[in-house]
Amino acid sequence: MLQDEIRQRLGINKSSNQNDFMLWMDCYHGEYPWLGGDNLESLGLAASISSEFARLATIELESEIVNDEELNKIYQEVIDHCRNFTEYAMAFGGLIIKPYPVGDEIRFDFATPDRYVIKDINSHVIFIDRIIKFEDDKDVYYTRLEEHMKDGHWIVTNSFYRSENYSTLGELCTQDGIAEWAGIVPESVIEYDRPLFAYLKNPQANNLDWQNKEGVSCFARALSLIQDADEQYQRTLWEFRGSELAIDADVTVLTQRGELPHGKERLFRNLGIDQESGFYEVFSPAIRDSSLFNGLNKILRRIEFTVGLAYGTLSEVDQVDKTATEVKASKQRSYATIVDIQKEIQKALTETAELICFWLNKQEPDISFSFDDSLIVDSETEQKIRMQEVAAGLIKPENYLMWRYGISEEEARKMLPSVEETDDEDDETVE
């Protein structure tokens, strides 16, 4: 693999900092290692889990640089892509956001793990940039390695390689004739006390290598269960196919040439023997769909528990009787997972905004963040607590109404029953 060759050339221990990102990428694409032959059906759970985490974490995300309109306009380019690159980060374990200057502009590179090699996330990272050109009736692969090393300050070096094989780095070459890399200097020194990129990672602990600071895929721990779910799904589809209505008939019922009918007439099946004239028998066995779907649903629930999603995200809730305590625990598990992801998003976006300011020689940004609280707070429980506080006289009723309906204090006061109305009601009760 290209990354292994890069590690070897740069003297990076191959056994250290290794994640299975290629496996995670294949699963995200729907290319699971257990699919093959006649068993090609899949539920696509790897992509669904990654997408759901990204959706829940960013569905109501609002963030802006409030102290500089020009900077905020640039920053919003990152926010516009937030859900997409969050999904990639969850699927592959991590993703690097790298702002970089091109003239007077700031551009962004959202690098997935196949496009970088990490020796130390805080001091030594190599970025991989590849261009394919057609030369002499064949594809030629040009690779640029952008190496970031910290030694008091950042030393950024660029080296260029040419290869006729996709899987190899090839030999050193120059950047001459490659318009995309024109103007890139071989080496530069940059005074900055933090990395020249932001690393967005899945907050889940790395159970593959606990010395590794890189993230792991959000579905990594559930891969064996995802395989079980796909196999159960294949059994279910086979049950439906195997129990399709058919009519077993002798050759006299079929065409004169003994051919099977086409289209809707495919339900006729030639027994291959000559029975008494006009013989036929309907083949319509019972379908065991209930037991198969129940089995699939239990596997999906185990997947939800393992990855940190609430029950019912992937599974069918109505098939399982749950107590109120089970429902609350399930939701709280999902809330906790999303909160952790949102913390990582906020950290990565803050570092990205600071880098934009650095490259443009601007003051430190004042950044605001707003996530959708309804996804991470049990609003029903919160409402009950606030109503109890009103009843106990701990907070004013208008404060509760302001929170409940999102209105101003003046509007809340108008909603409250007046003293006169309350007295009239009391008088009518006495009469």
Image (cartoon, rainbow, N blue to C red):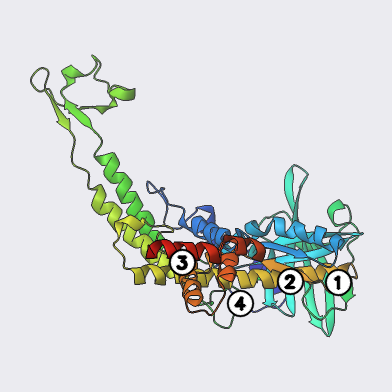
| Sequence order check, earlier mark of 3 and 2 | 2
Kindly identify which residue carries mark 2.
350
* Distance between mark 3 and mark 2 Cα atoms: 32 Å
Residue 15 picture location, percent across and down = 58, 78
Kindly identify which residue carries mark 4.
17
Element type where label 1 sits in the image: helix
Foreground label between 3 and 2: 3
Kindly identify which residue carries mark 3.
380
* Distance between mark 3 and mark 4 Cα atoms: 44 Å
Relative placement, left or right, of 292 versus 204 is: left
The residue nearer to you, when weighing 320 against 255, is 320
The residue nearer to you, when weighing 332 against 194, is 332
The amino acid on which the numbered mark 4 sits, given as a three-letter code, is Asn
| Sequence order check, earlier mark of 1 and 4 | 4
Element type where label 3 sits in the image: helix
Q: Few, some or many C-alpha atoms within 10 Å of disc 4 (few <14, some 14-19, many ≥20)?
A: some
Marker count (numbered): 4
Quadrant assignment, res 63:
bottom right
| Sequence order check, earlier mark of 3 and 4 | 4
* Distance between mark 2 and mark 4 Cα atoms: 26 Å
Q: Are marks 1 and 2 in contact (CB under 8 Å)?
A: no
Residue 366 picture location, percent across and down = 79, 71
Residue 409 picture location, percent across and down = 65, 66
Relative placement, left or right, of 200 versus 70 is: left
Quadrant assignment, res 401:
bottom right
Q: Please tell me the numbered disc located at residue 358.
A: 1
The amino acid on which the numbered mark 3 sits, given as a three-letter code, is Glu
